[in-house]
Amino acid sequence: MEEIGTNIRLLRKTKNITQEELANALHISYQAISKWENGSSQPDIALLPAIANYFGVSIDELFGFKLQAMTNKERFIRFMADTGVLSVGEFTLRAGDKCNYYINSENFCTNAQIAKLGEFFADCIRENHIEFDCIVGMAYHGISFASATAIALYQKYGITTNFCHDRKVNDSRGRMVCGHMPQAGERIIVIDDLVSSGRTLTERLDHLVSETKANIAAILVIAQKEPGASLLEKNHKTRVLSVINDEDISCALRDGII
């Protein structure tokens, strides 16, 4: 267990959290974290599953197996390939563009996979220091992704937030939002699966903002393409953040990650 303290420090720095925040999540003292990281003591074996779960790694990775070899983005790409979400080959997209990979978010179909995706999204929110009041899932794929993200924010970071999702068809009372109704001026994080051209999502966000008068703090997706991301950022004066992008996947293909 000689390297575990170094690995915990590496993971903590990668997640951009303090020793105090990690200690609170594990219900121990921050002095214990400090001792692990400086090598003067090691974590109790009973804590290892909780530590690994908090950082979204396996216990093997916590001990250093491939931890140094793979970045968070590479682990996510490997995760998508293993679950059949990411396929490699020659594909023609709806707009007619050619691409050497294809992402089918419908293949996130088990509770374990959705939970893991929620953790990656929660980490992205935390690492980008987004200030927000509500998580909004876009129908239909974004609903489960946003739900998992909201849960992960609470379980991993102790963050309580409002949650809702939009409707493609208004209900009998004319409402287009289920759950918390964002109020004027509230900062919302919009979660969807992918951004390609951005046109469809732009139209739906126009409707959402018109209905709620909320401010879009960020749009969060699995992966994004240009010019769709630029269109959304320009029209809604916000940031489009993705766990990965085209360059990340190209690098993973080049380096044999997938």
Image (cartoon, rainbow, N blue to C red):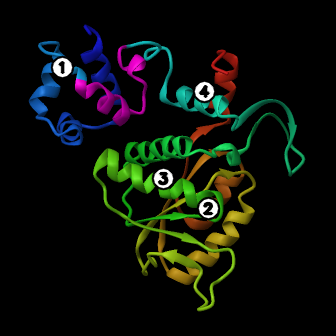
Q: CA distance from mark 1 to mark 2?
A: 46 Å
Q: CA distance from mark 1 to mark 4?
A: 29 Å
| Disc ID at residue 160 | none
Amino acid type, mark 1: Trp
Amino acid type, mark 2: Lys
The span shown in magenta is 46-63
Look at the numbered disc 1 and give the secondary structure of its residue: helix
Report which residue position mark 3 lands on. Answer: 148
Magenta span contains residue 55: yes
Report which residue position mark 4 lands on. Answer: 78
Is tag 3's residue or tag 2's residue first in the polypeptide sequence?
3
Report which residue position mark 1 lands on. Answer: 36
Q: CA distance from mark 3 to mark 2?
A: 28 Å
Q: CA distance from mark 4 to mark 2?
A: 32 Å
Residue 252 lies, in percent from the top left, at: 64, 23
Is tag 3's residue or tag 4's residue first in the polypeptide sequence?
4
Residue contact at pointers 1 and 2, CB within 8 angstroms = no
Q: Residue at x 43, y 15 (%)?
A: 68
Residue contact at pointers 4 and 2, CB within 8 angstroms = no
Closer-to-camera residue (24/246): 24
| Disc ID at residue 234 | 2
